[in-house]
């Protein structure tokens, strides 16, 4: 069922059906008007959502929440009952809008103004028609139970365990779609995947039950689609989240199981994971340059970026590869002959790998892997947790010339454009000194975008000292130009497998090799409008391409900070909203670990990144910032480059910044 039709059925249609039923309750004339007003507002939200106007839908839902809150200040139990369908619609809308990147204030169920309010028609306790006493359940008091709830199986006083209590619920209620599979782009096959969230953002915020999308979609009834979560189970999930959503197993990447979630805390590991050793430089085979590319090409879909990993073996990162699968480690450093990986590649144990009709590894490739293992199975990439596809791209990029990188980016851009432009519409391309510009926009528009990009590159040069032409982005950067926001949105879905916020009209990406900007531009746009859309992503892309492991938050923050100081006129209301969003994000941020671990909402991370970058670039610290950028250009890893320049780690700097901001 298309998402927008689904939203119509859960937001608009129930309101239309409910419109005549609300009047049947014992409501005053004022209360009836309040119900009608809220229903009309929700109906408006559904219509706006169906039309793709997500921001307008979010504003309407916010108005509906305010209307309910105001009405219930002097409302009755009957009015609260009459609002029940509307509140369910609001909860559903809140979760769905969150997935569209629209920030909506948390919705908290209103309470009666007085527990001693008179009953309708003077009914006495116990008389026919009496409404049951309302019990307000406080999630901060886990021992409190809703009336008529199933006797608890969880000892809440002892605490809720992820492995023993939460994991079985997730497997039992969500297993087919989101544990074994990745329906809707969301997979929670293990604790790490659950906390990472969907492609739209984090779904569990430790300590924050109201803002956790996982709870919202369950409470609204939207999930699971073919079943329900019991009161007891929902209470367990809420209590776990409220207590910090902690993991109490041995391995956060272990696949969840229906029996006990993951290995209990006291269950011994079958075989110890081999120690990760860094390369000495004496090895003849490079893992990053020689082995990782082989694994990425042959194992993608089954063990890398897989919806369901075969045999519990994940090869997304070096650490996961060394950990092994259900049968234990697959690599015995120093002993290729006894390594399960080599045996599987040769077909000596069980089914030959790779399976699924893919071609077997050549003897030369197996010998290369064997030599690497015999030399100690060492790591020469940036980090044991770096994705192997990124690691292999960076290794290639390190050896390639700027011209070779430009050619690779151009070829990849042309392939991406074919995928997005499946209907075969007219496309255009051109090259400038620093960019390959391509897209479905008209050729004059592409020429204008290319010219403005070259002109606005001056802002990137205020923070990046690099060569001209192809050397600036270490190969020409690509600019995708689309004439409609729909095309821009589809580009993000097709190429990046994600939805972009409804108010975006440009963004950047650097994946290790490909470096590009995607922008909406038409013949009707003013030159200044196009220039404004390019400044921030140009700066961010220039920063991101300085090093092998520059974090996104840093590059994004620097770009946004430079844009704010570029003299570009910003609408006063937009500036007020930005300031309010930064303040709200700071309030939500607990510590540097939460920020660096990407546990905040993406829009909150971006706002805080901008503020942190601005603090680094102010007059008192500008020398340190410039030193950091020089260190990155010299090839130092980000952590080392940062610590050398600022004399503290990034985490320590952010901790100090947060302490200063919160006073």
Image (spheres, rainbow, N blue to C red):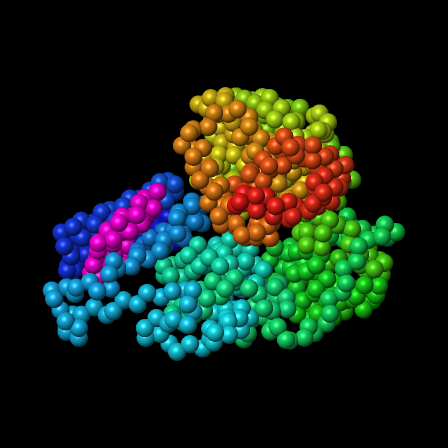
Residue 63 on the magenta segment: yes
Q: Nearer the viewer, residue 183 or 120?
A: 120
24 left or right, relative to 532: left
Task: Give the residue at x 42% y 57%.
Answer: 210
Across and down, in percent, residue 314 comes to 65, 61
Which residue is located at x 73 percent, y 66 percent?
273
Q: Residue at x 53, y 24 (%)?
A: 567
Counting from the top left corner in percent of width and height, residue 536 is at 56, 32
Q: Is residue 460 visible?
A: yes
Instruction: Give residue 292's position: percent from left, percent from top.
Output: 73, 52
- Check if residue 210 falls in the magenta segment: no
Vertical order, 119 against 27 (above or below) = below
Residue 477 location (% of width, % of height): 64, 32
Image position of 488 with respect to 531: above or below: below
Q: Which residues lie in the magenta part?
A: 59-86
Asked where in the image residue 24 lies, by quadrant, the reply is: bottom left
């Amino acid at each position: 069922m298309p998402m927008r039709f689904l939203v119509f059925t859960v937001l608009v249609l129930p309101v239309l059906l409910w419109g005549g039923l609300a009047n049947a309750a014992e409501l005053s004339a004022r209360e009836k008007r309040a119900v009608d007003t809220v229903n009309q507002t929700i109906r408006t939200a559904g219509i706006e959502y169906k039309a793709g106007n997500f921001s307008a839908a979010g504003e309407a839902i916010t108005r509906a929440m305010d209307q309910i809150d105001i009405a219930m200040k002097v409302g009755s139990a009957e009015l609260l009952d009459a609002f029940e369908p509307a509140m369910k619609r609001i909860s559903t809308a809140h979760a769905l809008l969150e997935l569209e990147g629209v920030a909506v204030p948390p919705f908290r169920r209103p309470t009666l103004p007085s527990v001693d309010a008179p009953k309708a028609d003077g009914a006495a306790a116990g008389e026919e028609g009496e409404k049951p006493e309302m019990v307000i359940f406080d999630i901060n008091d886990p021992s409190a139970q809703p009336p008529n709830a199933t006797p608890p199986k969880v000892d809440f006083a002892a605490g809720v365990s992820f492995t023993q209590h939460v994991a079985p619920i997730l497997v039992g209620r969500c297993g087919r779609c989101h544990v074994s599979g990745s329906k809707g782009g969301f997979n929670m096959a293990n604790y790490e995947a659950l906390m990472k969230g969907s492609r739209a953002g984090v779904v569990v915020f430790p300590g924050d039950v109201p803002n956790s999308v996982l709870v919202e979609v369950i409470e609204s009834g939207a999930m699971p689609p073919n079943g329900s979560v019991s009161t007891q189970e929902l209470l367990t999930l809420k209590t776990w989240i409220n207590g910090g959503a902690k993991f109490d197993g041995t391995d956060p990447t272990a696949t969840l199981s229906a029996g006990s979630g993951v290995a209990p805390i006291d269950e011994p590991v079958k075989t110890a994971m081999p120690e990760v050793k860094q390369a000495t430089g004496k090895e003849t085979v490079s893992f990053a340059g020689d082995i990782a590319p082989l694994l990425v090409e042959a194992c993608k879909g089954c063990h890398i970026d897989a919806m369901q990993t075969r045999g519990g073996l994940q090869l997304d990162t070096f650490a996961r590869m060394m950990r092994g699968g259900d049968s234990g480690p697959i690599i015995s450093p120093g002993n290729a002959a006894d390594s399960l990986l080599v045996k599987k590649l040769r077909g000596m144990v069980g089914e030959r790998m790779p399976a699924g009709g893919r071609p077997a590894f050549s003897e030369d490739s197996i010998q290369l892997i064997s030599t690497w293992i015999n030399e100690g199975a060492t790591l020469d990439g940036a980090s044991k947790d770096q994705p192997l596809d990124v690691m292999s791209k960076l290794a290639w990029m390190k050896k390639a010339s700027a011209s070779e990188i430009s050619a690779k980016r151009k070829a990849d851009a042309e392939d991406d454009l074919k995928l997005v432009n499946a209907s075969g519409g007219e496309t255009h391309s051109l090259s400038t000194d620093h960019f390959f510009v391509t897209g479905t926009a008209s050729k004059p528009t592409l020429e204008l975008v290319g010219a403005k990009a070259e002109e606005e590159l001056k802002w990137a040069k205020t923070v990046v000292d690099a060569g001209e032409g192809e050397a600036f982005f270490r190969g020409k950067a690509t600019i995708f130009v689309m004439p409609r926001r729909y095309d821009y949105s589809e580009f993000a879905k097709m190429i990046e497998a994600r939805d972009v916020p409804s108010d975006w009209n440009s963004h950047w990406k650097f994946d290790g090799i490909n470096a590009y900007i995607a922008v909406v531009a038409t013949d009707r746009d003013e030159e200044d409008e196009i220039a404004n859309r390019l400044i921030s992503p140009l700066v961010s892309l220039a920063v991101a391409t300085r090093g092998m492991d520059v974090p996104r938050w840093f590059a994004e923050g620097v770009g946004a900070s430079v844009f704010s100081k570029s003299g570009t006129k910003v609408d006063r209301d937009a500036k007020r909203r930005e300031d309010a969003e930064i303040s709200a994000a700071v309030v939500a941020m607990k510590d540097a670990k939460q920020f660096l671990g990407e546990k905040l909402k993406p829009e909150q991370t971006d706002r805080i990144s901008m503020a942190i970058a601005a603090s680094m670039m102010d007059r008192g610290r500008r020398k340190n910032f410039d030193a950091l950028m020089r260190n990155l250009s010299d090839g130092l890893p980000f952590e080392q480059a940062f610590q050398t320049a600022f004399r503290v780690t990034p985490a320590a700097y952010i901790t100090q910044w947060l302490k200063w901001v919160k006073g």
